[in-house]
Image (tube, helix red, strand yellow):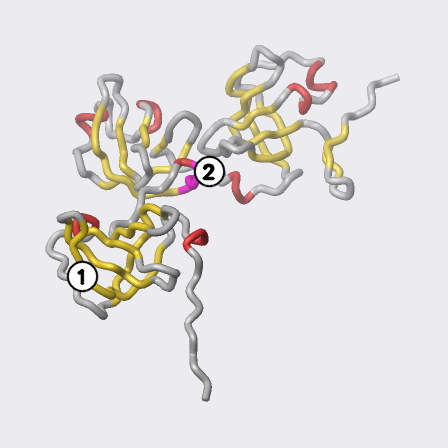
């Protein structure tokens, strides 16, 4: 006779934010706070406090519910029925999102909730409005808007201006048309390639022939995509790219 034994996973495999469909095992009260123990297939049942359920929710033993891991400890863990906020590092530069206007600043910026652990901000030059309306006049609190992630360093910067190019689709060596947007005092160049944020052409990526010419804001260049840094900013080069060697090659100086 065979007996089916359900193998339960150890708690150290749980991660905050993980989602599961679980079964309510028991309704209980702990330290005066009602809630339920929910079986999601681990060594112990998770604790779901009543305050982590939507208003009006009535739980019953045997009921299947969707839950998220909110906290993990050595011997137990807590669940919630509310979808957790997204950490900053999970957002991708160029990502399209739907957000809700939640506030304004005296500097003309918009605060927008896109489901992150912090609200995103739209600078004055990155929101769209008819005429010369201010952010406060153009958008209402709780209004839904479409935004793109522009930066995620020291906060979440958003834009309402659709990018012409998604840098996440680029491959190393891809050729791009660019326009100089700003000059770096250390010899690099910030260029507009049609992405949500300017790409950076570092000094090492500037060819000798280009170094010999005056670089001015507004000048058009042909660049090649190199990589994305950890903040999602594109790095480009004006050097020749070798597909076989997967590297950029500096031209030889004239004899």
- Residue 103 position (above or below residue 253): below
> In front: mark 1 or mark 2?
1
Quadrant in which residue 121 is drawn: top left
- The answer to whether residue 94 is magenta is yes
| Residue 94 in sight here | no
Q: In this orientation, which residue lies closer to the viewer: 71 or 64?
A: 71
**Measured from the top left, where is residue 52 in percent x and y?**
21, 49
Point 55% across, 32% down: residue: 229
The residues colored magenta run 89-95
Classified by dominant secondary structure, the portion drawn in magenta counts as loop
- Residue 125 position (above or below residue 234): above
Using the numbered discs, state the Cα–Cα distance from disc 1 to disc 2 in whole angstroms.
53 Å
- Horizontally, is 129 left or right of 43 in the view? left
Instruction: Name the residue beneath numbered marker 2.
Output: 164
Instruction: Name the residue beneath numbered marker 1.
Output: 27
Q: In this orientation, which residue lies closer to the viewer: 184 or 34?
A: 34
């Amino acid at each position: 006779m065979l007996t089916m034994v359900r193998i339960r996973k150890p708690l150290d495999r749980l991660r905050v934010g993980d989602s599961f469909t679980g079964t309510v095992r028991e309704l209980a009260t702990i330290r005066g706070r009602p809630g339920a123990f929910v079986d999601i297939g681990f060594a112990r049942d998770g604790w779901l406090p009543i305050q982590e359920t939507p208003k009006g929710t009535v739980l019953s033993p045997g009921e299947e519910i969707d839950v998220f891991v909110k906290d993990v400890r050595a011997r137990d863990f807590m669940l919630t029925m509310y979808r957790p906020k997204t950490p900053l590092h999970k957002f991708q530069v160029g990502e399209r999102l739907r957000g809700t206007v939640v506030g304004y600043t005296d500097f003309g910026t918009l605060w927008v909730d896109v489901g992150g652990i912090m609200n995103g901000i739209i600078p004055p030059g990155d929101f769209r409005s008819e005429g010369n309306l201010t952010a406060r006049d153009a958008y209402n609190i709780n209004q839904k808007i479409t935004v793109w992630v522009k930066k995620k360093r020291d906060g979440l910067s958003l834009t309402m201006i659709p990018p012409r190019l998604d840098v996440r689709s680029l491959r190393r060596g891809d050729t791009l048309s660019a326009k100089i947007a700003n000059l770096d005092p250390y010899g690099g160049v910030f260029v507009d390639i049609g992405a949500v944020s300017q790409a950076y052409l570092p000094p090492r990526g500037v060819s000798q022939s280009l170094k010999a010419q005056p670089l001015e804001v507004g000048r058009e260049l042909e660049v090649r995509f190199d990589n994305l840094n950890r903040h999602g900013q594109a790095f480009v080069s004006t050097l020749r790219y070798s597909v076989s060697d997967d590297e950029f090659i500096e031209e030889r100086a004239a004899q």
